[in-house]
Amino acid sequence: MKTLMLLRHAKSSWKDSELADHDRPLNKRGKKDAPQMGHLLSKEGLVPDLILSSTAVRARQTVEAVAKASSYKSPIELLDSLYLATAGKLLSDASSHAPDSVGRLLLVGHNPGMEDLVEILSGKREAFPTAALAVFEVGIDRWGALELGVETKLLKVYRPKEIA
């Protein structure tokens, strides 16, 4: 069994309309929610063994705050391919980048891909606002076997407003 966790980046700023989408930073709420989710990972015993994140500024700032607040010690792998990735691409990148020694994998990305993947893996539509975290138990022994149709069980969805 493996644990796959999906984290949508925290709330980003639209203050500077000249910035490219990829370069938008977190806003005030995002800067509050991201460490809160990191503390949650620590409290719930869900600190990942590996984090794969989109290269977008808002995703990087989210993952840095989450990693610090959860006392995550391993490297964070930034992947351009996770920027606005589809559900299928998220699964593909998890499958190809996570070594089998990793028990808990955290993917940090964007909607609609994250929300779509939560729905595909759980079989139901879940509200997945910024900084939301979905935790799945996945019936595989190696990440290379992660694909659509594998046995998954949604353990919990955490939303910042519900844990504040």
Image: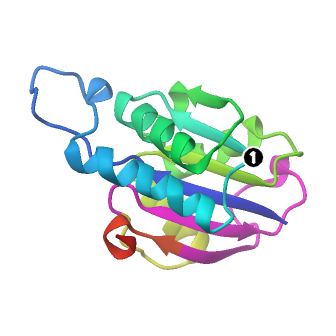
**Residue occupying the point 63% across, 45% down:** 71
Three-letter code for the amino acid on which mark 1 is drawn: Asp
* In-image side of 144 versus 26 (left or right): right
Q: Name the quadrant of the C terminus.
A: bottom left
In magenta stretch: residue 140: yes
Quarter where residue 52 is shown: top right
Give above or below for 98 relative to 151.
above
Give the total of numbered labels. Answer: 1
In magenta stretch: residue 136: yes
Viewer-closest of 6 and 49: 49
Q: Is residue 75 visible?
A: yes
Give the extent of the magenta segment. Answer: 129-156
Residue 133: x and y in percent read 49, 62
Task: Specify few, some or many for label 1: CA neighbours under 10 Å numbering under 14, 14-19, or 20 or more.
Answer: some
Give above or below for 14 relative to 42.
above
* In-image side of 157 versus 142 (left or right): left
Quarter where residue 123 is shown: bottom right
Residue 104: x and y in percent read 74, 55
* In-image side of 140 versus 95 (left or right): right
Give above or below for 137 relative to 14.
below
Residue 120: x and y in percent read 55, 68
**Residue occupying the point 69% across, 44% down:** 94
Viewer-closest of 90 and 65: 65
Q: Is residue 113 visible?
A: no
Quarter where residue 76 is shown: top right
Residue 73: x and y in percent read 69, 37
Circle 1 sits in a helix, a strand or a loop, which is it? Answer: loop
Residue position marked by numbered label 1 in the rendering: 49
Q: Name the quadrant of the N terminus.
A: bottom right
